[in-house]
Amino acid sequence: MNINQIYDELSLRIDKKRMVQDAPMKEYTSFKAGGNAALLVEPGSAEELSYALKVLSKYEAKHMVVGNGSNLLVKDSGYKGVILRIGKPFQELHVNGERLEAGGGALLSAAAVEAGNASLTGFEFASGIPGTIGGAVFMNAGAYDGEISQIVESAEVLSKDGTRVFTLNKEDLKLSYRHSILQDTGDVLLKATFLLKKGDPEKISARMKELTARRTEKQPLSYPSAGSFFKRPHNHFAGKLIQDAGLRGLSRGGAQVSPLHSGFIINTGGATAADIIDLMEIIRSTVMEEFGVLLEPEVRIIGE
């Protein structure tokens, strides 16, 4: 894969100011750790995104679409492909009756506020999840007994090769625990429509404040992390298994099992991706030995 050739072809339609060669991914991920990507591109519109995907498809170039980078870790050796970052041009939010339309780059927190301002209930659970709408639908994100599958109605999607835009309804998205069909197809969410219900604005606001307070009290929000590091194993809670295995507070380099919430791996300062991955492997092997439960990372780890 000739990254310079791809860069030159992309720059015919995409402003070079929105392309970064040898991009330091620690600046684009919530873990604030990890290596560089060969090229990072921030398309300025759906048309530019479509063009970028067509170019990457033509060269059969390795690439990945990301949002806020809140669930991503790039290995220290870097990622030799292209990162397409869905950002500000995809952040539109629009309320139409009991429906909220949200661009793939919109933050979940902003969408929750928009819904609350329109006296629409159902989105409160997502108000503190640090990702984007695109990442949330991709992962069927959830928290506090709520998840995207409960409120999403449909999604406007761009095919992996950039050639067509189509709509997937809720059933088409095949949403299950931390999974959607987008993980299988590689197609990209442009926007999603959520069907909510009219509610009491004071109750909605109070619920969001309550969830924020619970997060602040129980989660290590003052340190870089990717949120809950592991998927919830069947009939267990990852954080409790890790704590019961005696791993609370365990460190490797700058990475630590959070003393506040054992389900989080935090960057206490200067952690490398290797520190985080080493700690992850210690946790997985110890929990497997102690309880016979295999923890699967929820965080996406990419790189050479």
Image (spheres, rainbow, N blue to C red):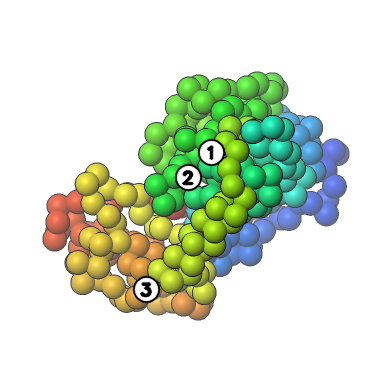
The residue carrying pointer 2 sits among few (fewer than 14), some (14 to 19) or many (20 or more) residues within 10 Å by Cα, namely many
Indicate the quadrant containing the N terminus: top left, top right, bottom left or bottom right: top right
Q: Residue at x 72, y 33 (%)?
A: 96
Q: Are marks 2 and 1 in contact (CB under 8 Å)?
A: yes
Query: For residue 109, which quarter of the picture?
Result: bottom right
Q: Secondary structure at mark 1?
A: helix
In the rendered view, would you say 102 is above or below 38? above
- Give the residue type at disc 2: Ala
The x, y position of residue 278, in whole percent, is: 35, 65
The x, y position of residue 78, in whole percent, is: 55, 57
Residue named by callout 2:
141
- The numbered mark, 2 or 3, whose residue comes first in the sequence reads 2
Q: CA distance from mark 1 to mark 3?
A: 28 Å
Q: Residue at x 39, y 57 (%)?
A: 229
Q: Residue at x 35, y 54 (%)?
A: 230
Q: Name the foreground residue: 103 vs 46.
A: 103
Specify whether 40 is left or right of 47. Answer: left
Q: Secondary structure at mark 2?
A: loop
- The numbered mark, 1 or 3, whose residue comes first in the sequence reads 1
Residue named by callout 1:
137
Specify whether 263 is left or right of 110. Answer: left
The residue carrying pointer 3 sits among few (fewer than 14), some (14 to 19) or many (20 or more) residues within 10 Å by Cα, namely some
Q: Secondary structure at mark 3?
A: loop
- Give the residue type at disc 1: Val
- Residue 260 is tagged as 3
The residue carrying pointer 1 sits among few (fewer than 14), some (14 to 19) or many (20 or more) residues within 10 Å by Cα, namely many
